[in-house]
Image (cartoon, grey):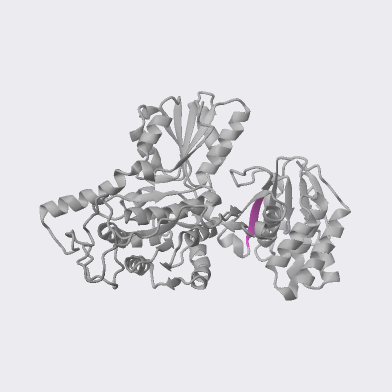
Amino acid sequence: MTETKKIRFVQGNEACVEGAMYAGLDFFAGYPITPSTEIAEHLSERLPRNGGKFIQMEDEIASMCAIVGASLTGNKVMTATSGPGFSLKQEAIGYACMAEIPCVIANVQRGGPSTGNPTHVSQGDINQARWGTHGDHSIIALTASNHQDIFEITVDAFNLAETYRTPVILLLDEAVGHMREKLVIPEKGELPIVDRLRTSLGKDVDYHPYLPREDGRLPMSDFGGEHRYNVTGLYHDMWGFPSNNPTVVNQLLRHIVDKIENNIHSITRYKEHYLEDAQYILISYGSSARSAIQLAEDRRKKGEKIGVLELQSIWPFPSEVIREKCARARAVLVVEMNMGQVMAQVKAAVEKPKRVFLANRFDGKLITPHDIKSLLRMVQGRGV
Amino acid sequence: MDAIRLVFSGSGGQGVITAAIILAEAAVIYSGKNATQTQSYGAAARGGVTRTDIIISEGVINYPGVIQPNVLMTLTQEAYNATSSIVRPGGLVLTDPRFVETAKKVDAKQLELPMYEQVMTKIGKPIVYNICCLGALIGVTQILEPEAVLDVLDERIPKDFINMNHRAFDLGLVLGSQYQYRRFT
């Protein structure tokens, strides 16, 4: 029975919950919203049973603030939301960027803007994940197209949040969040887990919360514990106290951007499907990647050399990987469920932006292999 | 057989979604296969036509939607009218004469099984109707071992209701087995 016990048949949202528990989630604060509700629902049961804390807050702003505070005190934290809730969380996400507080924000995307299309799929929050909060900053955003990958990318999200002391956005979508499929839960130890880097300084030693070690990382001290220090959303010095000294401002902004952008090679995640000899490359991510892979497999059977580059990290945008993989392609089709948010990035990345096309759908329906095929045939010059 | 695509449609509250989840779970956990299950969310889940798509396959399943089902089980007239045309030519349409009057123009094997009547005369509780339908579907198509479904029932259903569900499943299974049809792919 132990063998069958590890195999589950669950929704994508539950796969995210399982990944979070595996990664060592301690604290969740949230406000339920379709289509992310199952994440809160299942964590409300799982977390307390495993020594964690679950709080349903009065709204999304409070939820985001609660996880930021809980993280500072030494917990691995997350919240989950969708469209309108994600908008509300932006201010505190910016605070977490500035104060360098690890946290994971799952956004199960639905149609927007505003309350939009609550029960239907969209991938319209790509740019909001990058620039939803104001001011220069950098951010990590991950995504996945199937439940096994959702599990693993959720674990990755926690690991990256701890490694780089930054908010990490998990960009899921309604189709994959609500769909049920197989999930095999890995044994403990099968996937690496990154734990909080804590300071080794003792109780009475002066601790500088924002003084980087030689490797650039900032060891943390559980807030309210052994060390007293200041945390602020203002530009701050190594003690955490506000400063508008131009040198301090310049260095801090460079630091919070560079710590992510300079590590793009360690952060970038993608999968290749039939890419080796592909003449036409489909670039996709999340649930739409499933349709892209389906089409590639169908067309391969007819001898057409179609491949899929599936992005699993959207931000920082993997421009170099895309440029390299698409260098020999006759054309690139970006398959997504918005009006071309990733396509714009792909066009900027490749050498021949005029050979980049958009196969999209934004009516709340999951894009079908047939939708993509129609555009592909036009690009191939085969008519509709 | 590469993959079997099924669509269940009916009215919100009939239990078609639950039946779909049980079937797909039986395929994944107790039959070693892959399966996906998707469903319509929103207003349709509360009274309108509900629809759920299931794919069962030995291999990896990519696109989870079903365009042309091999097997269509439809449990209300409204659902039948809305979905009967999508069945794959040569496929199977399973209905209940208590709720659905079938049309002749469908290019598929149409099977009308009195599942509701069986449940009401032998058990008397409509709540297990969906499980009887699932039994009939397994009996007709033989796509999974009945034991796999029974294992899921044992896991999901509260102890006091297990016997009733087993009886409903068996009623459907016996009924369906008399009309085996396996050329739906």
Label the magenta part by its dominant secondary structure.
strand
Q: Residue at x 39, y 62 (%)?
A: A85
Q: Is residue A207 left or right of residue B153?
A: left
Q: Is residue B4 left or right of residue A350?
A: right
- Asked if one can make out residue B137 in the rendered structure from this viewpoint, the answer is yes
Q: Percent position (x, y) of residue A209?
A: 23, 62
Q: Nearer the viewer, residue A133 or A7?
A: A7
**Res A321 quadrant in image:** top left
Quadrant (top left, top right, bottom left, bottom right) of the C terminus of chain A = top right
- Asked if one can make out residue A136 in the rendered structure from this viewpoint, the answer is no
Indicate whether A376 appears above or below A190: above
Q: Is residue A94 left or right of residue B101?
A: left
Q: Percent position (x, y) of residue A120?
A: 51, 54
Q: Percent position (x, y) of residue A68?
A: 33, 65
Q: Confirm whether the magenta stretch covers residue B57.
A: no
Q: Is residue B119 left or right of residue A109?
A: right
Indicate whether B86 appears above or below A57: above
**Res A102 quadrant in image:** bottom left
Q: Residue at x 72, y 59 (%)?
A: B76
Q: Nearer the viewer, residue B170 or B126?
A: B170
Q: Nearer the viewer, residue A220 or A149?
A: A220
Per the rendered image, the range of residues in magenta is B48-54
Q: Residue furthest bottom?
A: B160
Q: Percent position (x, y) of residue B113?
A: 83, 57
Quadrant (top left, top right, bottom left, bottom right) of the N terminus of chain A = bottom right
Q: Confirm whether the magenta stretch covers residue B50.
A: yes
Q: Residue at x 86, y 59 (%)?
A: B174
**Res A300 quadrant in image:** top right
